[in-house]
Amino acid sequence: MQISAGEKTRQQILKGALAVIDKEGVDAVTHRRVGSEAKQSHGVVSYHFPTRDVLIQKAFEFHLGSAENYMSALGWRTDQRLTRSHLSKLLTRLVAEELSDARSIKIDLELSLYGARKPALAELFDNWVRIGCQNLSLALHHGGYEQPDELASSLVNLVRGFLLECLTNKTLTKLDFQARLELLLPASPIIEK
């Protein structure tokens, strides 16, 4: 599907806003700064996003939409029966992908912190996390795990906490995550193949 020139410009601006957030944090987001990053005039940025708050919110919505597509690109399906080893591989692959793009980790952190001050953004982020937990819970349920909702929430928090730690401890790798995950994963309720 082809997108319009206006939509291309909007996406370029949103990518520029995310680049500013990655480099300098949410507080650095201005129409002028984002325009410079996106190679657009500040007037064009203002035309598409009339206020700073709208620009920030739409940039985070754009980021979260990209993350959902990214999960399906990793091969994540809610109808699969997850064995312990398959679950470990999927989550470790997710962490490895995130570690290859520290930008995404910083943007997620900025989103969390900014959301704590902006209820609409907090709700957006919480819904996104909730959907991720629900999808993981469904896969765990199909795999026969006990308490799939609680396990899904714990695993999502493990991933998020590990990625946050990676921002300051650059020596951590996917193998460190996998070792922690193996300690916490319950035995698979179905026979491993």
Image (cartoon, rainbow, N blue to C red):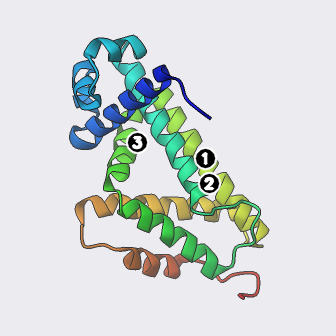
Quarter of the image with the N terminus in it: top right
Q: Amino acid at mark 2?
A: Cys
- Where is residue 143? Give x, y as percent: 75, 72
In contact (CB < 8 Å): disc 1 and disc 3: no
Question: Which residue is at the front of the view, 63 or 139?
Answer: 63
Residue 179 as seen in the image, left or right of residue 69: left
What residue is pinned by disc 3?
A: 112
Instruction: Check the picture and name the quadrant holding the C terminus.
Output: bottom right
First along the sequence among labels 3 and 2:
3
Q: Secondary structure at mark 3?
A: helix
Q: Please determine whether, in this image, residue 14 is positioned above or below residue 178.
A: above
Q: Residue at x 36, y 63 (%)?
A: 99
Identify the residue at horizontal 56%, vertical 43% (top origin). 128
Tag 2 residue: 133
Q: Is residue 106 visible?
A: yes
Q: Is residue 9 above or below residue 73?
A: above
Which residue is rendered at x = 44% and y = 81% of the image? 179
**Horizontal arrangement in the rendering, residue 175 relative to residue 147 (left or right):** left
Spatial separation of the CA atoms under disc 3 and disc 2:
16 Å
Q: Nearer the viewer, residue 79 or 112?
A: 79
Label 3 CA crowd tier, 10 Å (few <14, some 14–19, many 20+) = some
Amino acid of disc 3: Ser
| SS assignment at label 1 | helix
Secondary structure found at label 2: helix
Q: Which residue is mark 1?
A: 130
